Amino acid sequence: MEATYKVSGMMCKHCAARVKKAIETVAGVETVEIDLDRAIAIVGGEAKPDEVMAAVTAVGYGIDII
């Protein structure tokens, strides 16, 4: 299963790396791809969307599932 999220506040590679690291801590996440140019995160696995969004919010970024 794959889900795509719009991430707000990602401005640089450091931001993208921070978001990726936060998502990788969520149970059920198997893969994370960050597209900085489009400000999206593509998450593969069985992670619950609310847990992914909570992890990203906790490190200071906005996130919505699309």
Image (cartoon, grey):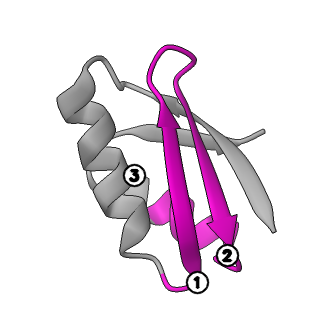
Image coordinates of residue 37 in percent, x first then y, are 49, 14
Residues at badges 1 and 2 in contact (C-beta under 8 Å)?
Answer: yes
Compared to residue 2, the image places residue 36 above or below, namely above
Give the Cα separation between the discs numbered 3 and 1: 18 Å
What residue is rendered at 37% in x and 39% in y? Answer: 61
Instruction: Rate crowding at label 3 as few (under 14), some (14 to 19) or many (20 or more) other CA atoms within 10 Å.
Output: some
Front position in the image: 60 or 1: 1
Most distant residue in the bottom direction: 27
Tell me which amino acid carries mark 3: Thr
Residue 2 is left or right of residue 9, and the answer is: right
Q: In this picture, is 52 found above or below 13? A: below
Give x and y (percent) for residue 27.
Answer: 50, 85
Camera sees residue 24: yes
Give the residues drawn in magenta, as a range.
Answer: 27-54
The residue singled out by tag 2 in the image is: 48
Q: Is residue 45 magenta?
A: yes
Amino acid bearing label 1: Gly
Write down the residue under mark 1: 28
Residue that carries the numbered disc 3 in the rendered image: 57
- Report the side of 54 relative to 4 (left or right): left
**Residue 24 image point, x, y percent:** 40, 68
